[in-house]
Every structure is written in C-alpha cells, then in structure tokens.
Image (cartoon, rainbow, N blue to C red):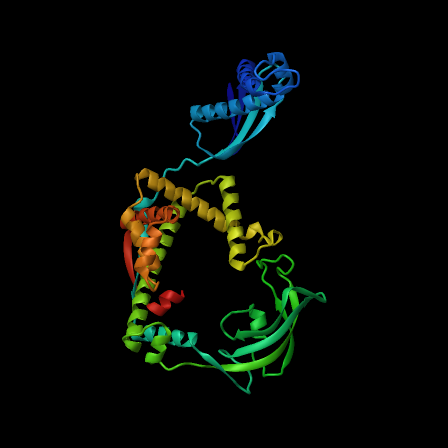
Amino acid sequence: MTNVKSITELKKEMIIEISSELIEEGINKRLIVIGRKAKIKGFRPGKIPSSVVRQHYGAEARQEALSELIQKSYAEAISEKKFRPVGSPLIEPQDNKKNSNFFYKATFETFPEIKLKGLDKIKLEKPEVDISDKDLNGMMEKLRKQKRTWSPINKKSSEGDQVTIDFKGLLNGDLIQGGEGTNVPVILGEGQMLPDFEKALYGLKSGDKKLFKVKFPKDYHSEELSGKKVDFEANVKNVEEAVLPSLDDKLAEEFGVKEGGIDKLKSDVKENMHREVDQRVVQDIKEQVMNNLLESNKIEIPEVMHNNEISNMQKESMRQMGIKDGEELPPAENYTEVAARRVRLGLLLSQFIEDNSLSVDSKKVRERIEEMCAGYENPSAMIEQYMGNPQFISQIEPIVIEEQAISLIAEKAKEKIKKISFTKYMDK
C-alpha cells in the first residue's frame, strides 16, 4: 500500500507499507546464510540451531532485510506513480499500532514537468565585429606593456606607475588576516588592490608615509572583513614609471616568433583577435538564447539541485581564491540567484535535448578540443593527448551537446545583424 502527498509542486511524501510476512521471509533467508558461516562457542560451524542463530543475529538480519525491502518497495512505488525523483529519498520509519506490518515515509523531490514554449518567437541580435588597424595597434600596445621594465622617478605617482610599498591593515587595532605586506608592487590603474586602497596610492613619492581607510565589499570572502572599514598604513619604498620596448623584431622574438619578425607577430595577433571574437559571438548568442528560454519558461526547480549548485559555486570560488580553510566558505546567499539560474537553464536545455533526441557529435567534440588547443605551441600534440583521454572527453561532451542544442535553437530564431567595433564589443 502506498499513499502519496504533495508538499509542494515538486516535493512529495509517500507512506509505504511492507507486510510482516515479507519481512519475516527476508529475515529467514539471511539467517540461513549467516548460520552456514557463523561461529558460536559450543557449536560446530553449519550445525548451529536456527533458534540460536536468530538469538545472536536476528537484529542484524532484520535490518538487512528491511533495508533491501525498503529499496525495492520505494523503486516499485516510484515506477508505479511515474515519478522522476531527484537524488535519494529521506526515509523515516513510522509508528504503527494497527498491525505488525512496517510503515515508512519517503520524502523526495521530483524533476519538474517541462513543456518548452516560445522557441518559435526567439529574436537574436548577432554582432558583426570589425577589427580595424586601430584595434590591432591597441592590442600591440598591450603586448608592449607585458614586456615593460621599470625606471625610478622622483615625482608624484600617477596612473600607470608602479608603487612599491610596505603596508599593514588594522581592524579595531588588531592586524587583519593577510593584512600585512613588504615590498609589494602595485601598478596604479590595473585594479590589483581594492579601489579605496589603490586610490590612496596616487600622488605619492618615494619615502612618503600615508594613513588611510579601506572599505571592504559586502561580498568579500572573509566574513570578518565583509562590509568593514579597515585602517591601513603604507610606506612608499619606490615609485617607478614604465619603459616600453620598441615595436620591432626583438619584441616578436620575446613572444616566441623566431621567423617573420614583427609582421608575423602582428599577423598572429590579428588571427587570435578573430578567434576571440568568434568565441565571444558564440557566447553572446548563447546568452541571448538562454535569456529567451528563461523568459518564456517559468519553472520551479528542485531544492536539492539548487543547494548542490550553490555548494559547487562556493567551493569553486574558494579554489579560485586559493582559500583552503573550510570556515572561510563564502556566504551561500552570494550565489543563490546565479545558482538558481544555472539549474533552470540546465533543466530547460536537457528537455530540449530530450525532445529533439540529440546525441553528441564526435566531430564537434574534436572541433571543441582544437579550439582549446589553438593557442598552444604544439597544438596537434595537445589535441591528440586530450582526444585519447576518456575522462577529459566525458567532461567535454556535456558542453558540446549543450552547444549543439543552442545552435539548433539559434538556427530557428529570427536574426538581426548589429555592426560593432572590436574594442567596443570586447570591452562591453
């Protein structure tokens, strides 16, 4: 017997009954197996009376029998009711005074029933990006900056200068964790430090000392500092200005171009700019498709999937920030909305893939890997290395089939071309 109760649209409760006869049958089967191998003082193995075996191992046999019967009865009930559960159920034994049967409550969430809407009304704005000589020159300037050297200056620091400092930060008179540094170089205008910290370093000369306050953002990874104002003291050791290398064949060599000189470097840079644009356009189209899907399909999401995604995002943030202390886990509320969006999009795309019977295109898997390896010195070797790694392929395939789904949706959408410059498009 199975009774079902809906707690929410997706959360269900089932009260399931297991007859005492089935339980006893399961116990007896286990006691027979146990009796053949059991060792009880005063009896030869395999010759122990069943009553003695039951006395010693009855509780263990009952637990094993119940566990198996719960799994089996739950699976049968799920199949009968045509539920699609998310994750494992919460099993809770229930008090029963009516008979000797066993009752338990299974609480679980189900996947939402999704019928995709609005696919025929999607409108996309496709960027048509122009890469001009000015854009190329700007990129070459960035390469020069990567190879810059520094020369001491005897004037006040300004944007682009490198200020080397000793500093310490105090909160209520106590040194904050990680709030002290010696000979720390800070390039003004590059956002290395928090905005208030960097702003305080403008207009300083070598030998200057400055006291200032820094307000930490509310989403800062440390709860101790989140939203707090910290007192800092900085001593300026050096102020230096950048010296950029000439745009010549020597610079090209520093970037690994041994033949063709600066012209070859420019050609390679422009090719890479085109590649970056193509990847960005694909991502742009993907975002538009996703936004359309979300807007047209309002669905509830399982709480367990939402919580799992929040947890994954917290751990990924810790990994990126190099935080290993579990007590410094970023607040869950920082990821609530983004995690919900990810789960909704994943469910909607999965439904589209199922509706259209899509399967992974192996050619597109290789193309994806080729794109990833394009920037390597020896891309062919890297491609073959990745293609021969089943674990890596299993990680790439879900990404590829998602891209296939996005492309198929985009193909059927109404498209409008928008012309835009490289710099404006990549900086937006």
Q: Residue at x 51, y 79 (%)?
A: 161
Q: Say which of 298 and 131 sits in front.
A: 131
User: Is 98 left, or right, of 359 in this rendering?
Assistant: right
| The image quarter in which residue 283 lies | bottom left
Above or below 278: residue 150: below
Residue 368 appears in the figure: yes
Q: Position of residue 175 (x, y in %)?
A: 68, 66
| The image quarter in which residue 385 lies | bottom left
Above or below 336: residue 58: above
> Residue farthest to the right?
173
Q: Position of residue 302 (x, y in %)?
A: 49, 39
Q: Say which of 15 and 413 sits in front.
A: 15
Q: Position of residue 83 (x, y in %)?
A: 44, 29
Q: Residue at x 45, y 48 (%)?
A: 342
Please count the marks in the image: 0
User: Is 200 left, or right, of 408 in this rendering?
Assistant: right
User: Is 257 left, or right, of 15 in this rendering?
Assistant: left
| The image quarter in which residue 298 lies | top left
Above or below 300: residue 31: above
Q: Residue at x 28, y 54 (%)?
A: 415
Indicate the quadrant containing the C terminus: top left, top right, bottom left or bottom right.
bottom left
Q: Say which of 419 and 376 sits in front.
A: 376
Q: Say which of 36 and 198 sits in front.
A: 36
User: Is 419 left, or right, of 245 in this rendering?
Assistant: left
Q: Position of residue 230 (x, y in %)?
A: 65, 67
Above or below 28: residue 150: below
> Residue farthest to the bottom?
154
Residue 9 appears in the figure: no
